[in-house]
Image (cartoon, rainbow, N blue to C red):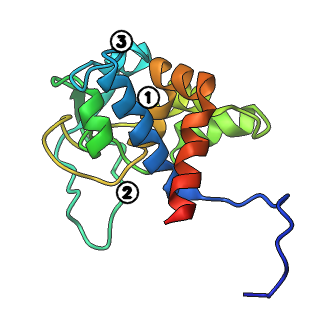
Amino acid sequence: QKKIPVNGTELYDIYSATKLFTMVAVLQLVEKGKLSLEDDLTSYIPEFAETKVLEGFNIRAFPPQKPDPSLPSHVHRNKIRIADLMSMTAGLSYDLEHPAITELLKASAYQADTLTVVREGISRLPLYFEPGTRYFYSLSHDVLVESSLVRVEIAVRPEVLLALVIQLAEK
């Protein structure tokens, strides 16, 4: 746009494009038998075992509403599966302004890594519905990438990400 020449040292924010990389890495693990789409998230991030589901929250409201913290809730009955995280049917929200996240970030002087935010912040956010029952665009891919097997595989095999970038750039 500004016609500034690229010299190869630039860094670009790719935001949600990382979902593609996450899905490829997860599917490669499934293909290798290291991960199952039916695996329970709590096998990798036990902090999600006690995550609560809001009762009576209307996710169809327009404009979207933040949930009332006084709504009754219960510990989720359905397990949160890897497949639910992949398809955004885990019941998670995209509430980056929830006190569980903002207080954690402030306490760490905004230095908390993503795994800490997932384990100590996102796991404390209420689910909007029982896992596996509805779709809602959420932080589920952030949780997925931080589940231990996915995190290890990406850290050990960065060539997966590089190969994807190269293939996409060549098309």
Q: Are marks 1 and 3 in contact (CB under 8 Å)?
A: no
Q: Residue 68 placed where, x, y %? A: 34, 50
Q: Quadrant of residue 36?
A: top left
Q: Amino acid at mark 1?
A: Ser
- Occupied quadrant, residue 160: top right
The residue drawn where x is 45% and y is 40% is 22
Of pointers 2 and 3, the one earlier in the residue sequence: 3
Residue lying at 84% horizontally and 82% vertically, measured from the top left: 4
Answer with left or right where residue 90 lies relative to residue 47.
Answer: left
Q: Is 112 situated left or right of 114 in this image?
A: right
How would you rate the neighbour count of disc 2 (Cα within 10 Å): few for under 14, some for 14-19, many for 20 or more?
some
**Which one is nearer the viewer's eye here, 163 or 50?**
163
Mark 3 residue element: helix
What residue is drawn where x is 64% and y is 37%? 103
Q: Residue at x 75, y 40 (%)?
A: 110
Give the answer, above or below, for where 143 lies relative to 70. above
SS class, disc 1: helix
Q: Measured from the top left, where is residue 42 in percent x and y? A: 35, 16
Q: Sequence-wise, which precedes: disc 2 or disc 1?
A: 2
Callouts 2 and 3 close, C-beta under 8 Å: no
Looking at the picture, how far across and down is residue 64, in whole percent? 32, 66
The quadrant in which the N terminus is found is bottom right
Instruction: Name the foreground residue: 36 vs 110.
Output: 36
Could you tell me residue 124's position as x and y percent?
A: 44, 30
Q: Secondary structure at mark 2?
A: loop
Q: Which residue is mark 3?
A: 43
What's the mark number on residue 66? 2
